[in-house]
Amino acid sequence: MIVVFTGGTGGTKLVQGLQHIVPPEELTVIVNTGDDIEWWGLHVSPDVDSVLYGLAGLLSKERGWGVEDDSFRCLERMKQLGQASWFSLGDLDLATHLTRTMLLRAGKRLSEATAELAAKFGIRARVLPMSDDRVSTMLDTAKGTLTFQEYFVRERHQVEARAVRFEGAENARPAPGVIESIETAEAIVFAPSNPVTSIGPILAVPGVRQALRETKATVAAVSPIIGGEAVSGPAGVLMTMMGWPSTIAGVAKAYEDFLDVLVADRADEAQALTMSTTGLRVLSTNTIMRSIDDKRELAAFVLGACTAQQNVVG
Ligand code: GDP
């Protein structure tokens, strides 16, 4: 089993690459739910939805989130009705949130609702939310305490963030299958997702980090930071806020207690060459994923690095 840890927009690209080279029954995707938001009375799981749409071939290529060719008529009408409209939900996207919300109201757990949605979309890989319990990523900022979506979407991550908290994490339990998949994985891949607000919440769920430290599987991560900056979004500034450098070394630092292989971009090759230690191999390749070939090639490179690492160790 190949197990992937991911957030939404960046991580999904690698998940799509892995989907092309790993049989679906051999792929488990563990997804951040710290970004989840209650919007217009609906439970929205933005990262889970990006992964579902990505695996189902429905993801908007242009936006990187939501459904391809979606319309926003409901959003327009909500604006006219004076409702909050800074968080955009497309009309087809709404069907996903309506279904999830109905399943949750009927007493299903988030992992069950996710599995049902995945099945309806024809997805055969296993998509697991990190937890069935509510964990909310909160940022202390110059404008007060904000939820992740308020910081990221409403404020366009332009306000200074001072600290991050994962509210509810202490009492959250990993969703069924999360710990078992870490324990039994052949390889574990951290997609190039934001280490602070996409991977951070998953690692904050009690038991996850420990399982990663103890697993026999090779753990590899693809850096979301290239040339000292995030490819997109606030990963760089949030890493600096955490006291980690906004470089591939900072990514290694975020995962230092369990990481075996770090895959960096060619742009960081010089730094990569200086970083390998007995506990960590740092490799470089093209990590910018524009086309499906880029995604597939990077996925193959990462899995190849995991196999090579097993040979080194074993
Ligand atoms: P979010 O939940 O939408 O924030 O999505 P993720 O956390 O999964 O992805 C955001 C991260 O992906 C950002 O830190 C970007 O730097 C990174 N990213 C986006 N596209 C790429 C890419 O093509 N290659 C690499 N290496 N990183 C990327």
Image: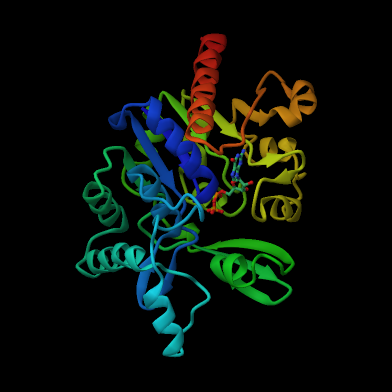
Point out the image quarter for the N terminus. top left
What's the residue at 52%, 25% (across, down)? 297
- To which quarter of the image does residue 126 belong? top left
Q: Which of the pair 57/48 is nearer the observer?
A: 57
Q: Which of the pair 255/121 is nearer the observer?
A: 121
> How far from the left and from the top, in percent, is residue 212?
50, 34
In the image, residue 37 sits, relative to residue 31, either above or below, namely: below
**Looking at the image, what colour scheme do you see?**
rainbow
Number of marks in the image? 0
> How far from the left and from the top, in percent, is residue 7?
50, 49
What's the residue at 67%, 56% (across, down)? 234
What's the residue at 74%, 67% (across, down)? 160
What's the residue at 75%, 30% (across, down)? 268
In the image, residue 302 sits, relative to residue 229, either above or below, namely: above
> How far from the left and from the top, in percent, is residue 157?
66, 65
> How far from the left and from the top, in percent, is residue 247?
75, 40
> Would you say 185 lies left or right of 168 here?
left
Q: Which of the pair 116/259 is nearer the observer?
A: 116
